[in-house]
Amino acid sequence: MVLDQRWQLKVEKNLLREDVIKDVRILQCHLLKKSQKVNRLDQMKSKIVALSKNEDFKNLLKKKKVSNKYITLFFGSLEDKDNKKLNISFVAKKKLIRGAVKRNKIKRRLRNIMNEAVKNISINLNYSYLVIAKITMLNNEYAIIKDTLFQDIEKIK
């Protein structure tokens, strides 16, 4: 009888060990997948940072600019800027573009174009950029706007 109890305890311990080992393996796999997701999210995020200070906007408006029929792009170097990230802000003037939905659509388009530009074109990270949208952005196709902006960005180098 004592032998049966001992045998049963050994069997239970072994089963518990196997369950624990399975649980540990499952947790390890889960943690590995989670870390891979985080790495993918970090890779997907671009290095774009918006300008925050009023002084930065005023200083950029005094610097160089490039214009086309869709945007006016002001650029120049600013003090206290991280050269590893792209400092850029998008502006859609309320007086020109009535309706928040339209303004937000334009800013979304500009953000997407700049994300693609960061991936495809070498952009000078020493500069900070201020993009002021014009009303003509609403009426034209995304691809056309993207091509003209890419040409302007390449001119800046």
Image (spheres, helix red, strand yellow):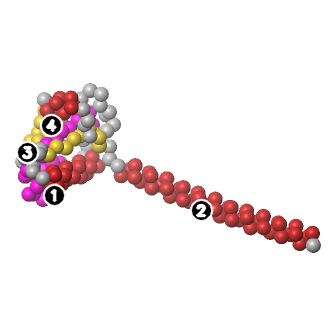
Callout 3 secondary element: loop
Q: CA distance from mark 1 to mark 2?
A: 46 Å
Amino acid bearing label 2: Ile
Callout 1 secondary element: helix
Give the residue number, with chain letter if any, for mark 4.
Answer: 74
Q: Which residues are magenta?
A: 125-153
Amino acid bearing label 3: Lys
Q: Residue at 83% across / 66% down in the picture?
A: 9
Q: Nearer the viewer, mark 3 or mark 2?
A: 3
**Residue 49 % position (x, y):** 29, 40
| Label 4 close to label 2 by CB (< 8 Å) | no
Answer left or right for 109 relative to 69.
right
Q: Is residue 113 magenta?
A: no
N-terminal-most mark, 1 or 3: 3
Give the residue number, with chain letter if any, for mark 3.
Answer: 95
N-terminal-most mark, 1 or 2: 2
